[in-house]
Amino acid sequence: MKTGFLDIPRAEDPLRDARERVLDFDDLHTRLPDNARSMQAQRCMNCGVPFCQSDFGCPLHNLIPEWNSLLEKGLKREALERLLVTAPFPEFTGHVCPALCEKACNLESHATTNRDNELYLIEEGFRHGWVKPNMPASRTKRRVAVIGSGPAGLACADLLNQLGHKVTVMEASDRPGGLLMWGIPNMKLPKEVVARRIRLMEEEGITFQTSCRADRSVLPQYDAAILCGGARKPRTLPLPHMDAGGIHFAVDYLSEATRALLEKRPSRLSAKGLHVIVVGGGDTGNDCVGTALREKCRDIVQLEMLPKPPGTRTLSNPWPEWPRTLRTDYGQLEAEAIQGQDPRIFETTVSSIGTDEDGHVREVTCVRVAQKDGRLLPQDGAETVLPCDLLLIAAGFTGADAENLSGFSLTPDERGRLMPPGGGHHLRENLFAAGDIRTGQSLVVRAISDGRDAAREVDAWLSSPKAAFPDGEPA
């Protein structure tokens, strides 16, 4: 009798040693051997009510117990086929998803290693040649433009192509991938993994146009267009001297670090030898910490306005909700190894910026904050001055960027989103929206799910007699 999780302990793909991995931008993890991965799949309970694939768990509703069962039996190709029924890009989510499915698992803190299992399956698929161009059975006469090539855009383009439509993806950057290429560091998501998927999509018939800033002039050329430009407008700090030298938004800093790596040159925004302060305690802030350490910064501090989360769940945050508990990510672990302590300072933000005579940041004054009447307010007499040569703002995003909005004459809602009043993805005429530009800043896996939902809505609209087409009714 197989006893699964009762006898097999949870084992994730191990992180490389922190002092070793900060010397390069290679993948953070090593992989478990085949037999160990099969044993991890054995831990799955094949629950009667699998919360892992519920709304609490996977936004894609991956058939997790089914492909874990196949993997456990050694049927890797069949397990991959079952995974690909719902997951178009397991190599992306296998690297960067926070594994909502594992947090909703009935085993809770002893959950099956679903994220590592799906990454193993897709990489085995590429290694053995099981992943091949998936050509649509037939083609329609409909032409669709997908504007933006991040996770939502790629997911939308992939499904629309499988449905037989002719898809063109327009990307403002010189390389496709959007957030996947420029917003996530190479050690977290190797860029060859993104490029490999783009090549496969091109083989399947999708056209990519790079260095292409689309606007409303493209709409008459296509039967439908879907805006997938992301929520790229960064939140700033309401302080004087924000235009000083050495102050950058996290997305610009991370993008330049990746571009420098791909072009095999030093970054123009390098943290080498500098006192670095990161404002923001989330995933992007952590990525800045990890990147600055690899650039050999002098030291690094990460400021987080919110209180330090509890170490375990509280009664107000029960399973299967996402656990609002303290999480120490790879960058913070690396800072601990290099600097001897966690770089985070909780309940703290920047209150003023000091510059030198050349207008370059040289110090910041930090203030402690406390919650009062539902707001985080500065505390009197709780200021600290820290040296700072590079100030990175990783405080989140406030919605679509101005160029996307003005280019299509669109007005966002009060949260900066292009969310149609009645829900769904249809904005007007033949224009739709998907991903973070529609929902606001979210996770890669949610953007993929939203892109697929948009593709289904566009496909239904293209078949509707209410749709107006520039070259006649659909075939």
Image: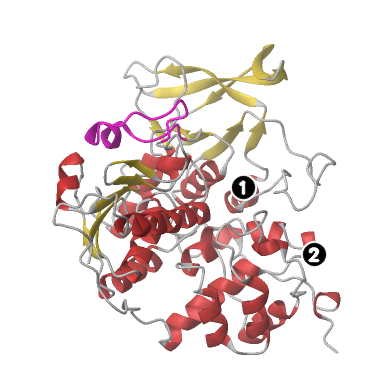
Amino acid tagged 2: Leu
Q: Tell me which segment is drawn in magenta.
A: 397-417
Determine crowd level at label 1: few under 14, some 14-19, many 20+ residues with C-alpha closer than 10 A. Answer: many
Q: Does the magenta stretch include residue 258?
A: no
Q: Does the magenta stretch include residue 416?
A: yes
Residue at point 58% right, 67% down? Answer: 62
Q: Which of 227 and 73 is in front in this view?
A: 227
Mark toward the viewer: 1 or 2:
2
Mark 1: which secondary structure? helix
Whether residue 442 is visible to the viewer of this picture, yes or no, is yes
Horizontal arrangement in the rendering, residue 311 relative to residue 155 (left or right): right
Mark 2 packing: few (<14 Cα in 10 Å), some, or many (20+)?
Answer: some
Q: Which of marks 1 and 2 is nearer the N terminus?
A: 2
Query: How is the structure coloured here?
Result: secondary structure
* Left or right of 202, for residue 380: right
158 up-or-down from 228: above or below: below
Residue 249: image location, x then y, percent:
41, 34
Judge by depth and name the residue closer to the eye, 121 or 340. 121
Which residue occupies the foreground of this view, 458 or 57? 458
Residue 418 horizontal side relative to residue 135, left or right = right
Residue 332's disc number? 1
Q: Which residue is pictured at 49% across the width and 76% down the height?
A: 122
Q: Is residue 78 left or right of residue 432?
A: right
Q: For residue 357, what is the image quadrant?
A: top left
Please tell me whether mark 2 sits on a helix, a strand or a loop: loop
Q: In which quarter of the image is the C terminus?
A: bottom left
